[in-house]
Amino acid sequence: GFSYGDYLRSGAMAAQSPIMRAVVEKAKAGTPVVGICNGFQILTEAGLLPGALMRNAGLNFVCRTVTLQVENNQSIFSSAFDKGQAVNFPIAHHDGNYFADSETLDRLEAEGRVVFRYVDNPNGSARNIAGILNDAGNVLGLMPHPERVISPLLGGVDGAVFFKGLVEAVS
């Protein structure tokens, strides 16, 4: 997280880094890409996902476990879950407030591109959005951290289910 110190905007400088040209090329070719937390910010700054991630509504860094609702389980990133299922992932961000204009938000909703939604919005994110897909469905931006809950020793296994489902979907 905090690529290049996030001094301009979160993810803005990283989105211009040389490696991102390859990421954009691969994403446009259909390769699955997941951006978690700062990765989500970078994907929006790179234009792979619509909208932007802004400062949290409370203007504070938020670090805690949140409950998400699975809105769409038809994507490769969410197929291991049931639609409507509650999952628990940690968050740790200062700029996790998802913003897009109302037309974009309506389109995301109508096209089923909102994959995860906060049950109790921790950051002011528009329509409680925690994770979205690109038009093609192969790029996911997600503010919460599934990689931090992959074992009971780490506080849960919902993240392990997320990654196992992704591996199975692309195998």
Image (cartoon, rainbow, N blue to C red):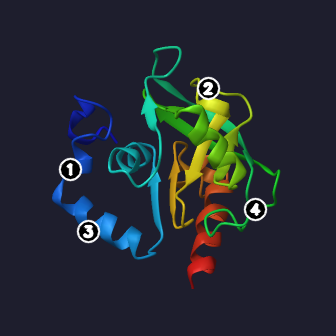
Above-or-below relation of 157 to 26: above
In the rendered image, which quarter is residue 83 located in? bottom right
Compare marks 1 and 4 and give the one earlier in the sequence: 1
Please, what secondary structure does the residue beneath circle 2 have? loop
Kind of residue indicated by mark 2: Pro
Query: Is residue 164 found left or right of 145 in the rendered image?
Result: right
Q: Which residue is mark 1?
A: 16
User: Do the CB atoms of the residues marked 4 and 3 lie less than 8 Å apart?
Assistant: no
Kind of residue indicated by mark 3: Ala
Q: Which residue is mark 3?
A: 22
Mark linked to residue 122: 2
Kind of residue indicated by mark 4: Phe
Please, what secondary structure does the residue beneath circle 4 have? loop
Query: Is residue 130 found left or right of 7 in the rendered image?
Result: right
Task: Measure how far apart labels 1 and 4 are at the Cα level.
Answer: 34 Å
Query: Can you tell which of label 2 and label 1 is closer to the viewer?
Result: 1
